[in-house]
Each structure stands twice: as structure tokens, then as C-alpha cells.
Image: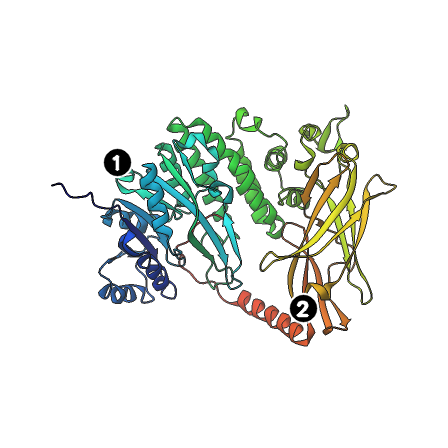
Amino acid sequence: MSSAPEPAGASVVVIGYNDAAHVPDAVRSALAQGPAVRQVVAVDDCSTDGSGELLARLAAGAPRLTVVRREVNSGGCGSPRNDGLDAVTSPYVMFLDSDDVLPAGAVDALLAAATEADAEVAGGLCVRRELPSGREHPWQASLYAAHAVVPRPSRRPRLVHDTLCVNKLYRTGFLRAHGIRFPEGRFLYEDFVFTARVLAAAPRIALVPDPVYVWQVRRAADRLSLSLDRADIGNWRARTRACALAHDILLGAGQKELARAARAKFLDHELRMYARELELRDPSYRRAWWAHTRAHLEQYDPADWERAPAAPGRLLARVVLAAPQPRDLGRLKELAARPARLCPPYARAQDGTPVWSDDLPGVTLAPLLTRPVRLLPLAVDAELRPRARATLLRLRLHELYGRVARAGPAEVAVEWRSRTDGRPAQRRTAAFAPAPDGSWSATVPVDPAGLGAGTWDLRLRVRFADGTHRDMTAHAATGAGLLRRRALPSARHGVLLVHPYATHSGALALRVAPGVRGILSVLHGRLHRLLHQARPTQTGNAHTTRPT
């Protein structure tokens, strides 16, 4: 009588360096998955903070835990993951970073999907958890909206947007048969290359809507993770290098559709994210970033520009290619926002064709003339003047080459959304009125005391007479005294500290601190940030190079 086949099981490879404060939680979250996890391989990358000894003590009481200690620090994430992969003995494997955790049932969900679909790879939802606030954001949620089986990656090019390796379960034999490994040594964004190698091998992929990974983002940490520390030009060079290598891997494997999608993803994600921050950098960084980005974009061929020519990332890239030196940084920041905003001036060439500016007529904006209104990079200026008696939000919608007038702006729905938990507040609607300069204006009352303590992001929905609408943010007007803190008398709180400000992407947001205790909390936070900025930068590398 033949015995039943052994049930599938997984190994979890946990990597860490000088992270004794968090690695026990990561390891315990893997062990807590239950019988689905046959083995946890913890790879310590030559830590000096006692992490290795801590892991050894954990292993003494956990037979499923194997500890691998590297004798020399690798400087990155690839080498320790490869070491862990070499030690894996289970049919499936997944990866976990020392400062993150696996939610309950994650491995069960992925194993069930992989075995049922006979898939080489199973992926699930990764949740970004901002600490200490605890606010959570799903990563690439549209990919994991429902259970699905993708026979081969070319059927769903959007897969290239999820470059994470940690929210997926891989068949160990598949990785070994195709020689799929991570780049060795100090190679930032190693996930990009590993994921490209996986997709290039054309695996059968199962997708599940279950949360399978909690990515814990600690922006206030003494030492930022490699991917969050974007103030050095080396980070951008490493990112473009990883993106270029991922493209070449896909193209070399004959995956042309995925290679095109990878380049489109660079324009829509990487380029826009770094462009939003460019105005914050010093002149030497800007020059180096501009020159390096132009060199990278010059590798694109004509077919790479054909899709969605009016998409914000493509317009931004064309400006960079057309200008030898950094320019129009404020306007590019607005275009790189999500949703995109194209702020004035709205220039035309001599033949009337919309162009970026009078002195860059080669950057055509003609594709905007046919782009759906719901996708246009419309610009609304927002002015907020906190007052003791009445605070008013004044909005001004700009015309965009006649497209707005043809659609007929009717009204704007306004809401303030909590930065902490995403809840909406003070939803109000106002009609647009035409202004003499060809724009449209609306005024909405705001009650800062009613919003309560916290940071509030402004969200708009512009509705048109033709039935369409555009969801958007608003450009923060920066006139004299507009963006400064004001202490207002409040019947409810005694005193209210109100601070309209512009986010990194130029959008209007509002901070509210009620009462004396709220004001003292703001002052304490400012002092903490000043002291944090004054600390010497720590050396070493945190094992987190996931994309933001």
C-alpha cells in the first residue's frame, strides 16, 4: 500500500544585519505560521550588535530554526538571501527581512494557491505599515484584488510593477533549475533583478488577495533603509542601474512585452518619485541627477515612447531629454504628483500646437488634446487663510488648451482626509463660477476645529457638465503669509494651532493642533526633529532595499 504524498511545506529565509531590536519578531512571525513552515533559515550578515547570539538562543528552543552566520558583511541583501536559499530544504521558499513580519496565515494562503494551481510562484498582498502611526497602505493592490492564475507573465505585463521578492512564495526547484539568484554584494534594489530573472523564466503564477507580508517603514529611524535614503545621488544611480539590468534580462529572454512594461514602469514610478524631490536637493545633486537621467533615457528606442504619449512620466522625461541643464523644477514636481498637475504657463508653438514652454517648443503637449478628461493633468490652485471667525478655502481651476471649457466644469466636491487613518471629513460641494481670466473659481468653508488633531490632506473631485469627473489634489498657493502657522481662539479648545503647508509634491495639506497640550506636542516634535537632524549619520547598511 503506497503512502500518501508528503504535504507541501515552505522554508522562510530571514536576513538581518545589526537589527537585534527587530529580528526576533520577524523570526517568531515565521515560526508562528505553523506546520506550513518546515524550516526558518535566519542569515546574520556579520552583525556586531549581538544579533547572532540572540538568534542562536532562539534556535536552541526552536528545532525548525537554522542560523547561518556570515563571516564578512556583504553590504547588501543579495548575498545573505543567496546563502539562505542554499540552506533551504523545503519544496517552497519565501523571504523575510529582519524588520518586517509575516501576518498569520500568510504561508498557508500562498501554499494553497501554489499547489492548487500547480504554480511555480504564488504572490499575495504586501501591506506597508508606517511606524509609529501604524497607518497601512497596500502595495500594488490592483494586482491582488482577486484570486487569479497567470499561465505566463506576458499575459499580465503589470506584474513588472511589483518588484518585491518578499510577498511571494517560490518553488525551490524552479529557482535552482533556472539558476535564479540575487546579485551579490552591495547591490541596491536587488529585488528588481531577482524579479526580472523570475519573470524571464516564464513561470506559472498564482495571485491571492490575502495580506501575506507586512513591510514596516520606519522613516524616523536613526539609520534609514537603503531604499528610503534617497538624498545621495548614488541611490538614484543604483536604482537606474537595477532598472536597466531588469529590462535587459527580460529583453534577453525574449520577453519583449515585459521589457517594454519595465521601461514604462520606470517613467511612471521611479522618474516621477525622484522628480518630486528634486527641488529639495542641492544644486550639485540636481546637476548630477539631470545628467545621469538624460543618459539613461537616451537608451530608450522610439517604441518605448509610443504608448500613452500624454502620460505624465513621458512628458517629464521629454523635458529632461530636451534641456541640457535642470530647469522648471517646481513645474516638474507638480507634473510628477499623483494625480499629476500641469501648472501654467500653457504655451503654444507658432502653428498653435501646445508645447511645454516658449523656449522648449520641441516638447509637444499635443497628445493632451485627445487624452480623456478624467486623465488630464488638470491644475487647481488652493488658497487657505485660517481666520478666527471664518476660514475659507478658495479654489481656482485652470483652463488646459480648451479641454476644460469643452467639458464644462460644473462643481467641485471637497473633502479632507486624515493622514493617519485615511478617514474623510467635512465633505462639501461648491459650484464653479467662470473668472475673467478664463479660469473657474469656487469657495468652500473649512472648520479646522471640527477636523481635530492631525494632518489632513485635501482631496477634490471636479465634476463636468458632460458627466465626467477628475479626482485630484490641489496646488498649494504660496502667496505672502499663506503657508504659515496661526494660533486661533477656539470656543471648543481654547486655542487652535493651524498650519496650511505644501507637501513634497506641492499639494495643499493642513496640520491642526488643538489646545495647549496640542501646541506643546507640536513644539516637542519640532525639537525632536532638530535634534535628530543634528546627530551624526550612522554607517552600515540596513537590510531593506525595497522600492518606495
Out of 44 and 538, give the one closest to the viewer.
44
Find residue 522 and report its horizontal and vertical position in percent: 63, 70
* Corner quadrant of residue 390: bottom right
The residue wearing badge 1 is: 177
Q: Alpha-carbon distance for marks 2 and 1?
A: 58 Å
Q: Residue furthest right?
A: 436
**Residues at discs 2 and 1 in contact (Cβ within 8 Å):** no
* Corner quadrant of residue 14: bottom left
Q: Is residue 297 left or right of residue 434?
A: left
Q: In this view, does 253 lie to the left or right of 61?
A: right
Q: Residue furthest top?
A: 351
Q: Is residue 258 left or right of residue 20?
A: right
- Is residue 447 placed above or below 144 in the rendered structure? below
**Residue 127 seen:** yes
Q: What element carries label 1?
A: helix
Residue 358's mark? Answer: none
User: Residue, x 60% and y 47% (percent of image)?
Assistant: 276
Give neighbour class at mark 1: few <14, some 14-19, many 20+ (Cα, 10 Å): few
User: Residue, x 44% and y 63% (percent of image)?
Assistant: 538
**Residue 182 seen:** no
- Is residue 197 placed above or below 416 in the rendered structure? above
Out of 146 and 300, give the one closest to the viewer.
146
Q: What residue type is disc 1 on?
A: Ala
Q: Residue furthest front?
A: 1
Out of 112 and 226, give the one closest to the viewer.
112
Find residue 408 and report its horizontal and vertical position in percent: 79, 36
Find residue 478 and report its horizontal and vertical position in percent: 75, 54
Find residue 108 and report its horizontal and vertical position in percent: 34, 50
Q: Is mark 2 on a helix, strand or loop?
A: strand
The residue wearing badge 2 is: 513
Q: What residue type is disc 2 on?
A: Ala
Give neighbour class at mark 2: few <14, some 14-19, many 20+ (Cα, 10 Å): many
